[in-house]
Image (spheres, helix red, strand yellow):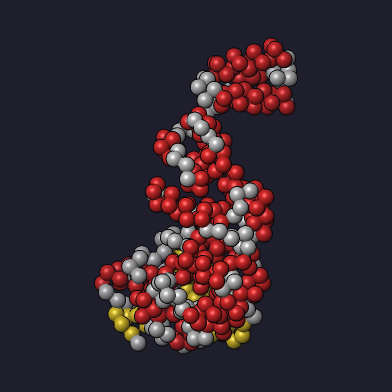
Protein backbone atom coordinates (compact mmCIF):
# COMPACT_ATOMS: atom_id res chain seq x y z
CA UNK A 1 0.00 0.00 0.00
CA UNK A 2 1.47 3.37 -0.99
CA UNK A 3 0.52 6.87 0.15
CA UNK A 4 2.09 10.27 -0.46
CA UNK A 5 3.73 12.38 2.23
CA UNK A 6 2.51 15.90 2.88
CA UNK A 7 4.62 18.79 1.63
CA UNK A 8 5.83 19.47 5.18
CA UNK A 9 6.85 15.84 5.64
CA UNK A 10 8.63 15.82 2.29
CA UNK A 11 10.58 18.93 3.26
CA UNK A 12 11.80 17.27 6.45
CA UNK A 13 12.73 13.99 4.83
CA UNK A 14 13.77 14.85 1.29
CA UNK A 15 16.44 17.44 1.97
CA UNK A 16 18.50 18.76 -0.96
CA UNK A 17 21.35 16.35 -0.17
CA UNK A 18 18.96 13.39 0.12
CA UNK A 19 17.34 14.32 -3.21
CA UNK A 20 20.77 14.45 -4.83
CA UNK A 21 21.75 11.05 -3.48
CA UNK A 22 18.47 9.46 -4.55
CA UNK A 23 18.92 10.93 -8.03
CA UNK A 24 22.46 9.52 -8.22
CA UNK A 25 21.32 6.08 -7.04
CA UNK A 26 18.48 5.93 -9.56
CA UNK A 27 14.86 4.87 -9.44
CA UNK A 28 15.40 1.89 -7.13
CA UNK A 29 16.50 3.89 -4.08
CA UNK A 30 14.48 5.15 -1.12
CA UNK A 31 14.83 6.65 2.33
CA UNK A 32 14.13 3.89 4.85
CA UNK A 33 13.63 3.08 8.52
CA UNK A 34 13.75 5.45 11.45
CA UNK A 35 13.83 8.65 9.43
CA UNK A 36 10.47 7.82 7.86
CA UNK A 37 9.02 6.85 11.23
CA UNK A 38 10.23 10.10 12.79
CA UNK A 39 8.73 12.24 10.04
CA UNK A 40 5.36 10.51 10.45
CA UNK A 41 5.58 11.27 14.19
CA UNK A 42 6.14 14.95 13.44
CA UNK A 43 9.82 14.90 14.41
CA UNK A 44 12.88 16.07 12.51
CA UNK A 45 14.85 12.93 11.60
CA UNK A 46 18.45 12.67 12.76
CA UNK A 47 19.80 9.84 10.61
CA UNK A 48 18.67 9.78 7.00
CA UNK A 49 19.45 6.24 5.85
CA UNK A 50 18.74 4.92 2.39
CA UNK A 51 18.33 1.57 0.67
CA UNK A 52 18.99 0.67 -2.93
CA UNK A 53 18.76 -2.33 -5.20
CA UNK A 54 22.29 -1.52 -6.38
CA UNK A 55 24.98 -3.75 -4.88
CA UNK A 56 27.70 -2.08 -2.77
CA UNK A 57 30.36 -1.94 -5.48
CA UNK A 58 27.87 -0.33 -7.86
CA UNK A 59 26.90 2.19 -5.17
CA UNK A 60 30.58 3.10 -4.70
CA UNK A 61 30.93 3.48 -8.46
CA UNK A 62 27.94 5.78 -9.01
CA UNK A 63 28.96 7.93 -6.03
CA UNK A 64 32.47 8.29 -7.45
CA UNK A 65 31.10 9.21 -10.87
CA UNK A 66 28.96 11.90 -9.22
CA UNK A 67 31.91 13.32 -7.30
CA UNK A 68 30.54 12.17 -3.93
CA UNK A 69 32.82 10.48 -1.42
CA UNK A 70 31.84 6.88 -0.68
CA UNK A 71 33.20 4.99 2.33
CA UNK A 72 32.84 1.18 2.48
CA UNK A 73 31.83 1.20 6.15
CA UNK A 74 30.10 -2.19 6.04
CA UNK A 75 30.46 -3.32 2.48
CA UNK A 76 30.40 -7.05 3.35
CA UNK A 77 26.91 -6.51 4.76
CA UNK A 78 25.85 -4.17 1.99
CA UNK A 79 26.45 -0.76 3.58
CA UNK A 80 28.26 2.19 2.05
CA UNK A 81 28.40 5.64 3.65
CA UNK A 82 28.07 8.62 1.33
CA UNK A 83 29.65 11.81 2.66
CA UNK A 84 27.99 14.94 1.38
CA UNK A 85 28.54 18.44 2.77
CA UNK A 86 30.24 16.96 5.82
CA UNK A 87 27.40 14.61 6.74
CA UNK A 88 27.29 10.83 6.39
CA UNK A 89 24.37 8.97 4.81
CA UNK A 90 24.26 5.18 5.05
CA UNK A 91 23.17 3.43 1.86
CA UNK A 92 22.42 -0.28 2.24
CA UNK A 93 21.69 -2.76 -0.52
CA UNK A 94 18.33 -4.54 -0.23
CA UNK A 95 18.80 -7.82 1.64
CA UNK A 96 17.12 -11.00 2.69
CA UNK A 97 18.30 -13.26 5.53
CA UNK A 98 19.81 -16.61 4.59
CA UNK A 99 20.31 -17.71 8.21
CA UNK A 100 20.80 -16.18 11.66
CA UNK A 101 22.61 -17.19 14.84
CA UNK A 102 20.76 -15.13 17.44
CA UNK A 103 22.86 -12.04 16.93
CA UNK A 104 24.23 -11.90 13.37
CA UNK A 105 22.45 -12.61 10.12
CA UNK A 106 24.02 -14.02 6.98
CA UNK A 107 22.36 -12.13 4.16
CA UNK A 108 22.10 -12.16 0.42
CA UNK A 109 21.37 -9.17 -1.75
CA UNK A 110 18.02 -8.82 -3.48
CA UNK A 111 15.93 -6.35 -5.45
CA UNK A 112 12.76 -7.24 -3.51
CA UNK A 113 11.64 -4.32 -1.33
CA UNK A 114 9.07 -6.42 0.50
CA UNK A 115 11.64 -9.07 1.42
CA UNK A 116 13.92 -6.34 2.74
CA UNK A 117 11.08 -4.83 4.77
CA UNK A 118 10.05 -8.17 6.25
CA UNK A 119 13.56 -8.89 7.60
CA UNK A 120 13.47 -5.79 9.81
CA UNK A 121 12.49 -5.81 13.49
CA UNK A 122 9.41 -3.60 14.00
CA UNK A 123 6.69 -2.59 11.60
CA UNK A 124 7.33 1.11 12.24
CA UNK A 125 10.94 0.60 11.07
CA UNK A 126 10.03 -1.03 7.76
CA UNK A 127 8.63 2.00 5.94
CA UNK A 128 10.31 3.54 2.90
CA UNK A 129 9.87 6.71 0.83
CA UNK A 130 11.02 7.34 -2.73
CA UNK A 131 12.26 10.57 -4.30
CA UNK A 132 8.73 11.70 -5.18
CA UNK A 133 7.49 11.35 -1.61
CA UNK A 134 5.54 8.12 -2.05
CA UNK A 135 5.50 6.07 1.15
CA UNK A 136 5.63 2.28 0.86
CA UNK A 137 4.29 0.10 3.68
CA UNK A 138 4.46 -3.68 3.33
CA UNK A 139 3.77 -4.68 6.96
CA UNK A 140 1.24 -2.23 8.42
CA UNK A 141 3.83 0.11 9.90
CA UNK A 142 2.04 3.34 9.05
CA UNK A 143 -0.98 2.43 11.16
CA UNK A 144 1.29 1.29 14.00
CA UNK A 145 3.17 4.61 13.95
CA UNK A 146 -0.14 6.47 14.13
CA UNK A 147 -1.26 4.31 17.07
CA UNK A 148 2.20 4.31 18.67
CA UNK A 149 1.99 0.53 18.67
CA UNK A 150 5.41 -1.10 18.79
CA UNK A 151 4.95 -4.43 17.04
CA UNK A 152 7.34 -7.03 15.72
CA UNK A 153 7.06 -7.92 12.05
CA UNK A 154 5.48 -11.35 11.73
CA UNK A 155 6.10 -13.78 14.57
CA UNK A 156 7.64 -11.96 17.54
CA UNK A 157 9.40 -15.05 18.90
CA UNK A 158 10.97 -15.76 15.51
CA UNK A 159 12.23 -12.19 15.23
CA UNK A 160 13.86 -12.46 18.67
CA UNK A 161 15.48 -15.80 17.91
CA UNK A 162 17.03 -14.18 14.85
CA UNK A 163 18.55 -11.43 16.99
CA UNK A 164 18.30 -11.48 20.79
CA UNK A 165 19.18 -7.78 21.00
CA UNK A 166 15.69 -7.13 19.69
CA UNK A 167 14.39 -7.81 23.21
CA UNK A 168 16.13 -4.72 24.53
CA UNK A 169 15.33 -2.78 21.37
CA UNK A 170 11.65 -3.56 21.93
CA UNK A 171 11.66 -1.98 25.39
CA UNK A 172 13.68 1.00 24.14
CA UNK A 173 11.19 1.58 21.34
CA UNK A 174 8.32 1.14 23.77
CA UNK A 175 9.88 3.83 25.98
CA UNK A 176 10.23 6.32 23.13
CA UNK A 177 7.36 5.51 20.79
CA UNK A 178 4.97 3.16 22.56
CA UNK A 179 1.43 3.73 23.80
CA UNK A 180 -0.07 2.62 27.11
CA UNK A 181 -1.14 -0.77 25.71
CA UNK A 182 2.00 -2.74 24.83
CA UNK A 183 1.80 -5.53 22.29
CA UNK A 184 0.87 -8.76 24.09
CA UNK A 185 2.68 -11.02 21.61
CA UNK A 186 5.85 -8.94 21.93
CA UNK A 187 5.79 -9.09 25.73
CA UNK A 188 5.21 -12.83 25.77
CA UNK A 189 8.07 -13.42 23.33
CA UNK A 190 10.37 -11.24 25.45
CA UNK A 191 9.35 -13.13 28.59
CA UNK A 192 9.99 -16.54 27.03
CA UNK A 193 13.39 -15.53 25.68
CA UNK A 194 14.57 -13.33 28.57
CA UNK A 195 17.06 -16.02 29.60
CA UNK A 196 18.98 -15.33 26.36
CA UNK A 197 19.77 -11.71 27.24
CA UNK A 198 23.04 -12.63 29.06
CA UNK A 199 24.38 -13.98 25.75
CA UNK A 200 24.52 -10.44 24.36
CA UNK A 201 27.57 -8.21 24.28
CA UNK A 202 27.52 -6.15 27.47
CA UNK A 203 28.56 -3.08 25.52
CA UNK A 204 25.42 -3.37 23.38
CA UNK A 205 23.31 -3.97 26.49
CA UNK A 206 24.75 -0.85 28.11
CA UNK A 207 24.09 1.23 25.00
CA UNK A 208 20.46 0.09 24.78
CA UNK A 209 19.80 0.67 28.47
CA UNK A 210 21.42 4.10 28.64
CA UNK A 211 19.45 5.19 25.57
CA UNK A 212 16.18 3.81 26.99
CA UNK A 213 16.82 5.74 30.21
CA UNK A 214 17.05 8.99 28.24
CA UNK A 215 13.43 8.73 27.12
CA UNK A 216 10.90 11.19 28.53
CA UNK A 217 9.62 8.65 31.06
CA UNK A 218 11.46 5.31 31.09
CA UNK A 219 9.59 3.88 34.07
CA UNK A 220 6.68 2.22 32.20
CA UNK A 221 9.14 0.37 29.95
CA UNK A 222 11.26 -0.58 32.95
CA UNK A 223 8.18 -1.92 34.71
CA UNK A 224 7.45 -4.06 31.65
CA UNK A 225 11.04 -5.32 31.80
CA UNK A 226 10.43 -6.30 35.42
CA UNK A 227 7.21 -8.12 34.54
CA UNK A 228 8.84 -10.10 31.74
CA UNK A 229 11.95 -10.99 33.73
CA UNK A 230 14.23 -9.01 31.44
CA UNK A 231 15.40 -6.28 33.84
CA UNK A 232 16.77 -8.77 36.35
CA UNK A 233 18.95 -10.16 33.55
CA UNK A 234 20.32 -6.72 32.75
CA UNK A 235 20.26 -4.76 35.98
CA UNK A 236 19.46 -6.95 39.00
CA UNK A 237 20.38 -4.03 41.30
CA UNK A 238 17.29 -2.09 40.15
CA UNK A 239 14.73 -3.13 42.74
CA UNK A 240 13.10 0.23 43.50
CA UNK A 241 12.08 3.13 41.25
CA UNK A 242 11.47 5.71 44.00
CA UNK A 243 14.77 7.54 43.40
CA UNK A 244 14.06 7.57 39.65
CA UNK A 245 10.64 9.14 40.29
CA UNK A 246 12.18 11.81 42.51
CA UNK A 247 14.86 12.47 39.91
CA UNK A 248 12.27 12.89 37.14
CA UNK A 249 10.40 15.37 39.33
CA UNK A 250 13.57 17.38 39.86
CA UNK A 251 14.37 17.26 36.13
CA UNK A 252 10.96 18.69 35.30
CA UNK A 253 11.16 21.38 37.96
CA UNK A 254 14.57 22.63 36.86
CA UNK A 255 14.22 21.90 33.11
CA UNK A 256 17.14 19.46 33.11
CA UNK A 257 17.88 17.33 30.08
CA UNK A 258 17.53 13.64 30.97
CA UNK A 259 20.82 11.79 31.35
CA UNK A 260 20.91 8.02 30.97
CA UNK A 261 23.87 7.78 33.32
CA UNK A 262 22.24 9.89 36.04
CA UNK A 263 19.04 7.89 35.77
CA UNK A 264 21.05 4.68 35.92
CA UNK A 265 22.59 5.94 39.15
CA UNK A 266 19.09 6.50 40.56
CA UNK A 267 18.31 2.79 40.06
CA UNK A 268 21.37 1.59 41.98
CA UNK A 269 22.07 1.40 45.70
CA UNK A 270 23.80 4.70 46.56
CA UNK A 271 27.21 3.18 47.24
CA UNK A 272 30.52 3.41 45.43
CA UNK A 273 30.77 -0.38 45.49
CA UNK A 274 27.49 -0.81 43.60
CA UNK A 275 28.44 1.82 41.05
CA UNK A 276 31.85 0.22 40.51
CA UNK A 277 30.35 -3.26 40.09
CA UNK A 278 27.78 -2.12 37.51
CA UNK A 279 30.30 -0.04 35.58
CA UNK A 280 32.66 -3.00 35.44
CA UNK A 281 29.95 -5.47 34.42
CA UNK A 282 28.62 -3.21 31.65
CA UNK A 283 32.15 -2.28 30.56
CA UNK A 284 31.36 1.43 30.68
CA UNK A 285 33.99 3.83 29.41
CA UNK A 286 36.40 5.16 31.99
CA UNK A 287 34.68 8.56 31.95
CA UNK A 288 31.22 7.03 32.44
CA UNK A 289 32.48 4.68 35.16
CA UNK A 290 34.04 7.60 37.03
CA UNK A 291 30.87 9.67 36.70
CA UNK A 292 28.74 6.79 37.99
CA UNK A 293 31.00 6.42 41.02
CA UNK A 294 30.91 10.18 41.67
CA UNK A 295 27.11 10.10 41.51
CA UNK A 296 27.07 7.36 44.13
CA UNK A 297 28.66 9.71 46.71
CA UNK A 298 28.22 13.33 45.66
CA UNK A 299 24.44 13.54 46.31
CA UNK A 300 25.07 12.75 49.97
CA UNK A 301 27.83 15.39 50.12
CA UNK A 302 25.41 17.98 48.79
CA UNK A 303 22.72 16.88 51.23
CA UNK A 304 25.20 17.42 54.06
CA UNK A 305 26.34 20.82 52.76
CA UNK A 306 24.81 23.31 55.15
CA UNK A 307 26.24 26.47 53.62
CA UNK A 308 26.86 28.05 50.24
CA UNK A 309 30.58 27.76 50.92
CA UNK A 310 30.35 23.98 51.28
CA UNK A 311 28.41 23.77 48.01
CA UNK A 312 31.09 25.85 46.30
CA UNK A 313 33.71 23.39 47.52
CA UNK A 314 31.80 20.58 45.85
CA UNK A 315 31.51 22.62 42.69
CA UNK A 316 35.23 23.28 42.61
CA UNK A 317 36.07 19.62 43.21
CA UNK A 318 33.51 18.01 40.87
CA UNK A 319 32.33 20.66 38.41
CA UNK A 320 28.91 22.05 37.53
CA UNK A 321 27.76 19.10 35.44
CA UNK A 322 28.35 16.47 38.13
CA UNK A 323 26.95 18.70 40.87
CA UNK A 324 23.82 19.44 38.84
CA UNK A 325 23.20 15.73 38.36
CA UNK A 326 23.92 15.03 42.02
CA UNK A 327 21.64 17.84 43.18
CA UNK A 328 18.83 16.40 41.05
CA UNK A 329 19.44 12.96 42.53
CA UNK A 330 19.52 14.35 46.07
CA UNK A 331 16.57 16.68 45.54
CA UNK A 332 18.42 19.56 47.18
CA UNK A 333 17.64 23.16 46.29
CA UNK A 334 21.08 24.46 45.34
CA UNK A 335 20.38 25.15 41.66
CA UNK A 336 20.65 28.98 41.96
CA UNK A 337 24.18 28.48 43.29
CA UNK A 338 25.01 26.12 40.46
CA UNK A 339 23.73 28.55 37.85
CA UNK A 340 25.77 31.42 39.29
CA UNK A 341 29.00 29.45 39.66
CA UNK A 342 32.07 30.66 37.81
CA UNK A 343 34.96 28.33 38.52
CA UNK A 344 37.85 30.25 40.09
CA UNK A 345 41.40 29.53 39.03
CA UNK A 346 43.94 28.75 41.72
CA UNK A 347 46.24 31.79 41.45
CA UNK A 348 49.51 30.17 42.53
CA UNK A 349 51.83 28.39 40.09
CA UNK A 350 54.88 26.23 40.43
CA UNK A 351 57.05 28.97 38.93
CA UNK A 352 56.01 31.25 41.79
CA UNK A 353 57.46 28.78 44.28
CA UNK A 354 60.57 28.16 42.20
CA UNK A 355 61.30 31.89 42.42
CA UNK A 356 61.34 31.48 46.20
CA UNK A 357 64.14 28.96 45.95
CA UNK A 358 62.14 25.74 46.16
CA UNK A 359 63.57 23.08 43.85
CA UNK A 360 61.52 21.06 41.43
CA UNK A 361 60.26 17.80 42.87
CA UNK A 362 57.67 16.27 45.17
CA UNK A 363 58.04 18.99 47.80
CA UNK A 364 56.94 21.66 45.31
CA UNK A 365 53.82 19.75 44.31
CA UNK A 366 53.02 19.01 47.94
CA UNK A 367 53.27 22.68 48.88
CA UNK A 368 51.02 23.70 46.02
CA UNK A 369 48.38 21.18 47.16
CA UNK A 370 48.58 22.39 50.75
CA UNK A 371 48.20 26.04 49.74
CA UNK A 372 45.36 25.19 47.36
CA UNK A 373 43.54 23.41 50.18
CA UNK A 374 43.98 26.49 52.36
CA UNK A 375 42.71 28.68 49.49
CA UNK A 376 39.63 26.46 49.12
CA UNK A 377 38.96 26.56 52.87
CA UNK A 378 39.05 30.34 52.58
CA UNK A 379 36.26 30.18 49.98
CA UNK A 380 38.65 31.01 47.08
CA UNK A 381 39.12 34.61 48.22
CA UNK A 382 42.91 34.78 48.52
CA UNK A 383 44.73 36.26 45.53
CA UNK A 384 48.16 35.32 44.19
CA UNK A 385 50.13 37.51 46.58
CA UNK A 386 48.20 36.24 49.60
CA UNK A 387 48.66 32.62 48.52
CA UNK A 388 52.37 33.23 47.95
CA UNK A 389 52.71 34.82 51.39
CA UNK A 390 51.02 31.79 52.94
CA UNK A 391 53.39 29.48 51.06
CA UNK A 392 56.39 31.46 52.34
CA UNK A 393 55.01 31.25 55.86
CA UNK A 394 54.74 27.47 55.54
CA UNK A 395 58.26 27.26 54.18
CA UNK A 396 59.65 29.41 56.99
CA UNK A 397 57.79 27.40 59.57
CA UNK A 398 58.45 23.94 58.23
CA UNK A 399 61.42 24.27 55.92
CA UNK A 400 61.18 22.21 52.74
CA UNK A 401 58.43 19.92 54.06
CA UNK A 402 55.20 21.90 54.56
Residue extending furthest toward the top? 396
Image quarter in which the N terminus is found: bottom left
Residue extending furthest toward the left? 7
Q: Position of residue 321 (x, y in %)?
A: 50, 44
Q: Is residue 212 visible?
A: yes
Tell which of 86 and 319 is nearer to you: 319
What's the residue at 59%, 60% (across, down)?
A: 238
What's the residue at 27%, 74% (across, down)?
A: 6
Relative to 391, does residue 217 appear above or below in the rendering? below
Image quarter in which the C terminus is found: top right
Residue 256 located left or right of residue 317: left
Place residue 113 in its image quadrant. bottom left
Q: Position of residue 122 (x, y in %)?
A: 47, 78
What's the residue at 47%, 45% (across, down)?
A: 331
What's the residue at 53%, 82% (across, down)?
A: 156
Q: Position of residue 168 (x, y in %)?
A: 55, 70
Q: Is residue 32 visible?
A: no
Relative to 289, does residue 7 appear above or below in the rendering? below
Q: Position of residue 226 (x, y in %)?
A: 56, 68
Tell which of 220 and 123 is nearer to you: 220
Place residue 33 in its image quadrant. bottom left
Residue 318 located left or right of residue 334: right
Tell which of 399 and 230 is nearer to you: 230
Q: How many marks?
A: 0
Tell which of 401 and 181 is nearer to you: 181
Amino acid sequence: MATVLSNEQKARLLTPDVKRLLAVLGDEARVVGGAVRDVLLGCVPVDLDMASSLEPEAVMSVLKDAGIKGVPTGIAHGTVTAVLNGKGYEITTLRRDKDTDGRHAHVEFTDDWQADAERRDFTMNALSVDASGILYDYVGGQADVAARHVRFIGDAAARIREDVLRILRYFRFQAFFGNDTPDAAALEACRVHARLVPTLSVERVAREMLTLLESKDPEPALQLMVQTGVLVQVLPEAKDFERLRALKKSERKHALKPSGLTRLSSLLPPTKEAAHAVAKRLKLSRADAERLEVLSELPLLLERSHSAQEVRRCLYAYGVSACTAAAALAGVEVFPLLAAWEAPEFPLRGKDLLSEGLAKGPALGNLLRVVEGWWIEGDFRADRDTCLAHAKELLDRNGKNP
